[in-house]
Image (cartoon, rainbow, N blue to C red):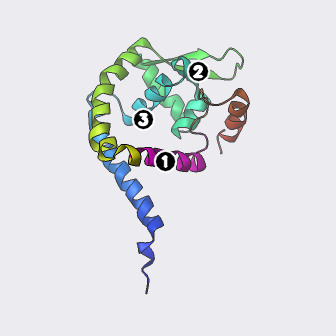
């Protein structure tokens, strides 16, 4: 009799969750040393990697899987700490941008060397270049299928795709 729990699909998801939990625990401690939560680090990193160090709040919500109200709370807190600011969207009065400040970039630059060292030690350094390339390809495929809004507002997307993506990625998606 076959044990249904020996299914490789269950193993794959289980390993993904276990790897995520282990990496998250290691990263959280390092980020806290720099006064950032993992959510704040994700927000500031996504903004710093975006054109002009900014994203529309709705795109930031879509990229982080936070609700729009969750992004608002995080941005409010980070704005109070001087790490981010908001800027009105010139062509849509209903939208605003979250923008990394100079202080936010400084905090990120202070945090990043240790974070990259940990990524190398506990994640990418565990794989040879061919295995890493295959993993990145596989993760992108899974991400695009499971979370199609993850690149909302990115430079790689045409304005038409951004508009269509924003509609698909709106609250209640």
Within the image, what quadrant is residue 34 found in?
Answer: top left
Secondary structure type for disc 2:
strand
Please rate how many residues cluster around mark 3, counting C-alpha atoms within 10 Å: few if below 14, some from 14 to 19, many from 20: some
Please rate how many residues cluster around mark 2, counting C-alpha atoms within 10 Å: few if below 14, some from 14 to 19, many from 20: many
The x and y percentages for residue 89 are 65, 17
Q: CA distance from mark 3 to mark 1?
A: 20 Å
Which segment did they paint magenta?
132-149
The residue depicted at 41 percent of the width and 65 percent of the height is: 11
Q: Quick check: 153 left or right of 133? A: right
The x and y percentages for residue 105 are 40, 17
Q: Earlier in the sequence, mark 1 or mark 2?
A: 2
Secondary structure type for disc 1:
helix
Q: Earlier in the sequence, mark 3 or mark 1?
A: 3
The x and y percentages for residue 41 are 40, 30
Secondary structure type for disc 3:
helix
Q: Nearer the viewer, residue 121 or 55?
A: 121
Q: Is residue 131 visible?
A: yes
The residue depicted at 50 percent of the width and 25 percent of the height is: 47
Q: Can you identify the residue that label 2 sits on?
A: 97
Q: Nearer the viewer, residue 145 or 17?
A: 145
Q: Can you identify the residue that label 1 sits on?
A: 139
């Amino acid at each position: 009799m076959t044990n249904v729990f020996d299914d490789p699909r269950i193993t794959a998801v289980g390993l993904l969750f276990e790897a995520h939990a282990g990496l998250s625990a290691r990263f959280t401690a390092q980020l806290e040393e720099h006064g950032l939560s993992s959510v704040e680090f994700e927000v500031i990193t996504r903004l710093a990697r975006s054109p002009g160090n900014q994203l529309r709040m709705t795109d930031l919500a879509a990229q982080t899987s936070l609700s729009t109200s969750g992004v608002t709370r995080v941005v409010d807190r980070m704005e109070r700490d001087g790490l981010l600011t908001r800027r009105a969207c010139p062509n849509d009065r209903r939208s605003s941008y979250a923008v990394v400040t100079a202080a936010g970039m400084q905090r990120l630059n202070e945090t990043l060397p240790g974070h990259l060292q940990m990524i190398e030690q506990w994640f990418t350094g565990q794989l040879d270049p061919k295995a890493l390339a295959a993993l990145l390809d596989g993760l992108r495929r899974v991400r695009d299928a499971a979370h199609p809004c993850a690149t909302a507002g990115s430079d790689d997307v045409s304005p038409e795709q951004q508009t269509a993506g924003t509609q698909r990625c709106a609250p209640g998606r």
